[in-house]
Image (cartoon, coloured by chain):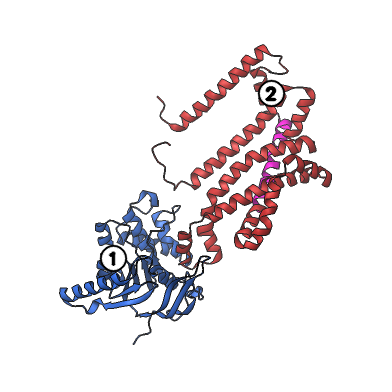
Amino acid sequence: MISNPRIVRALQAAASTLVIAGLWQVGSLFFPHYLFPPVPDIVTRTLGILFSWPLLAEVLVTALRIFAGLLGAFVLGCAMAVAIGRSARIESYVTPVLVFLQGIPALSWVVIAIIWFHGIEFRIFFIMVLTTLPAFTFQILDAFRSMSKDLFEMTMSFRPRRWTLFRVLIVPTIVPGILTAWKVNLGNAARVVVVAELVGATGGVGYELLRQQQLFDMAGAIAWTLQLVLFVLVVQQSITAIESWALRYRAVSERAM
Amino acid sequence: MPEPVIRFRDVNKVFRRPNGDLVAVERLSFEVAPGEIVAVLGKTGCGKSTMFNLVAGLIEPTSGEVAVSGHDPFRDFEFFRGKVGIVFQGDRLMPWRTALGNVLLGLEILDAAPERAQAVARGWLARLGLAGHENDYPHALSGGMRQRVSIARAFAVEPELLLCDEPFSSLDEMTARDLRAEFVRLVRQNGKTAIFITHQISEAMEIGDRVLVFHRPARIAFEARMDRARGDGARQQIQDKILEVLALDAPA
């Protein structure tokens, strides 16, 4: 009997993945391979991308675009959250704009970016920032506003300088919110970047998906999709590991909900 | 006469609210001498904590003068760095810091040398019976232990003035009694001036050199010198008078 909860969770995840793969394989026996390619074909194509430097480079390009877009939105979102947090007047002007931006579909930004800009990288950066900026701003602002008044007053009783207050109270308070924002926005960004690359790029996972569609190659389409899924999973796990370390002070109940 | 550490002169504090202003402090005047422990007693909602926040410089008076060591605690922000230690009603520990980290907080803010700060913080934890718990996070400590950490945090910066807002009210009687005795010993031993807010008559009489009884909105309804009350009879008289004065205050 395995008692390590991490190993148990990993085995459970592997079991459900195997069930889906099994069902797919069964499907491939009854449907044409261009609709349901056999699982071994998909695995071969997936590993082929991973072990071929030119193909892997396409995945890394997409990964870099995701990181660049998220970083840009994060920095801008932090600045906007601080500005909104410090001034009710700024909040009353900026919040409606962010709410408006939230309502614009990613595909609309793709069209706008293609019309406005020539450079591919700037187009994608622009799309990524605009689609993830509102969520980053609101999540960081919420984290800032959830700061305990009691802890704020206690810290202020020592009369800290502004930077010290930021370091000893504000940063630890907003870290959980920032990590959650990154996790949430990472998934969104992965979806948006594919759309942006599909329409407006000549490289990356989105562009490769477009090529597979033109070739009617389902195994290739799934293999490229899996690259992105794997990338998101690896980064999510990394953020979770950072989260576990950063929030190690939190009490954990032995009883599950 | 030595210069008072705390001076309130005709202080008023009004909180503006949409459904009508709330007068929390009304023409409050009193002084606290160096080395004196003043216990402030009153019913819930009588404005004790507002007075406390005025002394701590967390809020500004609507009118009148609040002076601590001759300075305005709300405006002279820099002057009070390291001069005031506060023990709050709740422990107000930072959950992401260990017991040691919490005691180090004030020292870090005051830019104390790290080695000295560590030694001071560890020393205070040991004095309060928490040696061996330095690396425990607050959630792993009992209520009494957490409040000890908060006392250590207040004392570690060696403040001239200690402010305590019902610091033991959430603890069981035995723990509260022990901590009370420890607190008084530390205040006396270190020659601190202290304001101790409480709603327990016995606690006020045990701790204070002087007891101020507040009526709502915060104003002094009765004042007694405990350091001059000799014998059980005198103390009983004071207790009876405090009870009588408190009974006259309208409920909150």
Give the left or right position of residue B203, taking residue A4 as reference.
Answer: left
State the residue position of label 1.
B200
Tag 1 subunit = B
Pointer 2 local density, CA inside 10 Å: few below 14, some 14–19, many at least 20: some
Residue farthest toward the top in the current orientation of the protein: A30
State the residue position of label 2.
A45
Q: Which residues are magenta?
A: A51-75
* Secondary structure under the numbered disc 2 in the rendered image: helix
Give the left or right position of residue B135, taking residue A217 as reference.
Answer: left
Observer-side mark, 2 or 1, equals 1
Relative to A132, say whether A234 is above or below: above
Is residue A206 shown to the viewer in this render? yes
How far apart, in angstroms, are the residues tagged by discs 2 and 1? 76 Å
Q: Position of residue B148 (x, y in %)?
A: 33, 59
Query: In the rendered image, which quarter is residue A210 located in?
Result: top right
**Mark 1 residue type:** Gln
* Secondary structure under the numbered disc 1 in the rendered image: loop
Give the colour chain B carries in the figure. blue
Pointer 1 local density, CA inside 10 Å: few below 14, some 14–19, many at least 20: some
